[in-house]
């Protein structure tokens, strides 16, 4: 007898926020990213009707489609196909894969990588196969290319490993020690920003003015290295100052916007130790370093400056 719908496996993954080094990381400089457990993607795999093949059901996106009929550049379909091939599953198993996510889309919180990671984990679990974090990250990178064009790989790395990472493109990942846990307020501008477009604009500007951009990326890279040292020694005042400097450099790169700048100023007026845009920029999120004393006030100031939502997360 066919046990339609009975066998179920789930996989989850957190969102992420980039603390230092966005954009410069595409050009080989170091960056730091941390997972954000307060937002999550979840995938569920269950046995389907005999002969149905693979059905993808992404409720948040209003998408329900057969894998065999999905567009070739559909990132969800690509990650499912690549994972099934990697697990050496014979073609067209009868499965329904349901995806849900509370990670906001196109806001720099890694929604694409989170959904892909949850899907890879759920499929591996369904077929009782073990994948290392590195194996998951490499598969997710394949789908990331569809979202981002030429991604540095930082999103899939931090989300698959689920730990703060010091990341340099093409090099072995470094997981480092957080000496004193610290708290971030992640404030959403409400402005949707497509990473692919912003990265392409930066590429054009870079090609027109190599000297200026190499200098800016060097400065950002140095800040990421200093940021790591500040986290390892638990120097939060230093950490905040470095975030402010990184934000100023991202303004010079040309990826901030008035809404982000206004929120950064408000966070500092509210008592944050530092604030910077996070991710591609031109919208998306602002990340601020807060203390238990300043947290409530910073959150209020951010909302008054236009934040649509504020997520508080602890890094440890
Ligand atoms: O918008 P996000 O969080 O996906 O961040 C993109 C980060 C960039 O450095 C701008 C691009 C990349 O591939 O690293």
Image: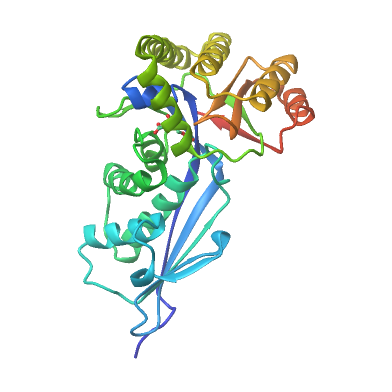
Apparent side of residue 187 relative to residue 239 in the rendered image (left or right): right
Q: Is residue 7 above or below residue 269?
A: below
Residue furthest front in the image: 208
Q: Is residue 203 above or below residue 117?
A: above
Q: Where residue 44 sits in the image (x, y, percent)? A: 45, 64
Residue at screen point 50% across, 52% down:
41
Q: Where residue 225 sits in the image (x, y, percent)? A: 39, 13
The foreground one among 270 and 141 is 141
Q: Where residue 66 sits in the image (x, y, percent)? A: 40, 72
The foreground one among 191 and 47 is 191
Q: Quadrant of ligand 1?
A: top left
Q: Where residue 169 sits in the image (x, y, percent)? A: 30, 28
**Residue 4 appears in the figure:** yes
* Count of numbered tags: 0
Residue 4 falls in which quadrant of the image? bottom left
Q: Is residue 254 above or below residue 40?
A: above
Residue at screen point 35% across, 85% down:
50
């Amino acid at each position: 007898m066919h046990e339609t719908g009975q066998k179920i496996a789930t996989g989850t993954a957190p969102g992420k926020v980039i603390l230092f080094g966005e954009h410069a990381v595409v050009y080989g400089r170091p960056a730091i990213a941390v997972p954000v457990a307060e937002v999550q993607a979840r995938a569920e795999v269950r046995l389907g009707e005999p002969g149905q093949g693979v059905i993808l059901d992404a409720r948040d996106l209003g998408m329900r489609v057969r894998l065999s009929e999905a567009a070739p550049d559909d990132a969800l379909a690509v990650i499912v196909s690549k994972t099934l091939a990697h697990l050496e599953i014979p073609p067209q198993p009868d499965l329904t894969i349901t995806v849900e996510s509370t990670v906001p889309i196109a806001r720099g919180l890694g929604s694409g990588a989170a959904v892909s990671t949850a899907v890879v984990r759920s499929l591996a679990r369904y077929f009782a196969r073990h994948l290392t974090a590195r194996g998951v990250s490499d598969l997710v990178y394949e789908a990331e290319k569809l979202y981002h064009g030429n991604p540095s790989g930082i999103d899939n790395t931090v989300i698959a490993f689920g730990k703060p990472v010091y990341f340099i493109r093409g090099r072995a990942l470094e997981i480092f020690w957080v000496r004193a846990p610290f708290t971030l307020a992640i404030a959403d501008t409400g402005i949707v920003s497509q990473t692919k477009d912003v990265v392409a604009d930066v590429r054009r500007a870079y090609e027109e003015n190599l000297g200026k951009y190499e200098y800016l990326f060097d400065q950002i890279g140095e800040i990421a290295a200093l940021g790591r040292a500040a986290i390892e020694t638990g120097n939060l005042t230093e950490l905040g100052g470095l975030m402010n400097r990184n934000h100023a450099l991202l303004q010079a790169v040309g990826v901030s916007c008035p809404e982000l700048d206004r929120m950064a100023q408000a966070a500092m007026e509210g008592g944050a130790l530092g604030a910077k845009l996070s991710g591609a920029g031109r919208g998306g999120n602002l990340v601020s370093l807060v203390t238990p004393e300043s947290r409530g006030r910073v959150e209020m100031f951010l909302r008054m400056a236009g934040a649509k939502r504020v997520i508080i997360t602890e890094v440890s």
